[in-house]
Image: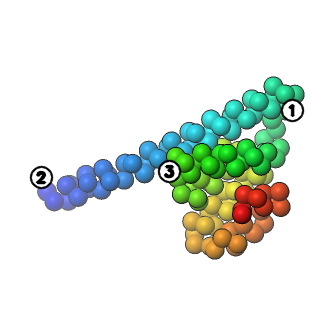
Amino acid sequence: MSLGIVVAVLALAGAAPWWTVDLATRRRTSRLAADHRVARQRHGRPARPDAPCDVPVLLELLAAAVRSGAGVPRALRATGDAVGGHDGEALARAADALRLGADWDAAWRGVPERLEVVRR
C-alpha cells in the first residue's frame, strides 16, 4: 500500500469523531426545537416560523449543543438552524462572524437586544 493511501485513511479516521459530534449536535438541537414548537401548539400558541423563540429555550438548546461536544460557534449555528426565524438568523450570523475571526463583541453586533443574555 502506498504511503499516500495510508495517510489519507488515517486522516479520515481522525476526522470521523468530529463529523459524528456535528451530526449529533444538529440532531439534538433540531429535536429540542421541534419539541418546543409542539409544546407551543398544545398550549394554544401557534409556532410561527418568524415568531421569536423563548430565551430559556435558546439557552437550553445551546447548552445541549455544547454538552454534546460542539464548540461555541458550531453550537450557535446548530441552534440558529434549529430555531429558524429572526432569532435563528441572528445566532447564525454571530456564529459565522466568530468562525471568520471576529471578536466576541463584533460578532454580536446587530443581534436583537432580547438575545443579550445569550451573548453574555
**Of labels 3 and 2, the one closer to you:** 3
Would you identify the image quadrant in which residue 115 lies?
Answer: bottom right
The image shows residue 1 at horizontal and vertical percentages of 12, 52
SS at badge 3: loop
Give, as a three-letter code, the residue at label 1.
Arg
Residue drawn at x 83%, y 57% as measured from the top left: 114
Circles 3 and 2: CB atoms closer than 8 Å? no
Q: Residue furthest top?
A: 42
Looking at marks 3 and 2 on the same chain, the residue that comes earlier in the sequence is marked by: 2
> Which mark's residue is nearer the viewer, 1 or 2?
1
Please name the residue that numbered disc 3 is placed on. Answer: 69
Is residue 76 or residue 64 the one in the foreground?
64
User: Image quadrant of residue 45?
Assistant: top right
Q: Is residue 100 visible?
A: yes
Q: CA distance from mark 3 to mark 1?
A: 33 Å
Q: What residue sits right under mark 1 in the picture?
A: 45
Q: CA distance from mark 3 to mark 2?
A: 35 Å
Residue 65 x %, y %: 58, 48
Q: Quadrant of the C terminus?
A: bottom right
Mark 2, residue position? 1
Q: Residue drawn at (57%, 65%), measured in percent from left and top? A: 99
Look at the image and tell me whether residue 50 can be seen.
Answer: no
Label 3 CA crowd tier, 10 Å (few <14, some 14–19, many 20+): some
Q: Sequence-wise, which precedes: disc 3 or disc 1? A: 1
- Crowding around mark 1 (Cα neighbors within 10 Å: few <14, some 14 to 19, many 20+) is few
Q: Position of residue 38 (x, y in %)?
A: 74, 29
Q: Which numbered mark, 3 or 1, is in the foreground of this view?
A: 3
Judge from the rendering whether residue 17 lies leftward or rightward of residue 97; answer left or right: left
Q: Secondary structure at mark 1?
A: loop
Number of numbered discs on residues = 3
What residue type is disc 2 on? Met
Image coloring type: rainbow
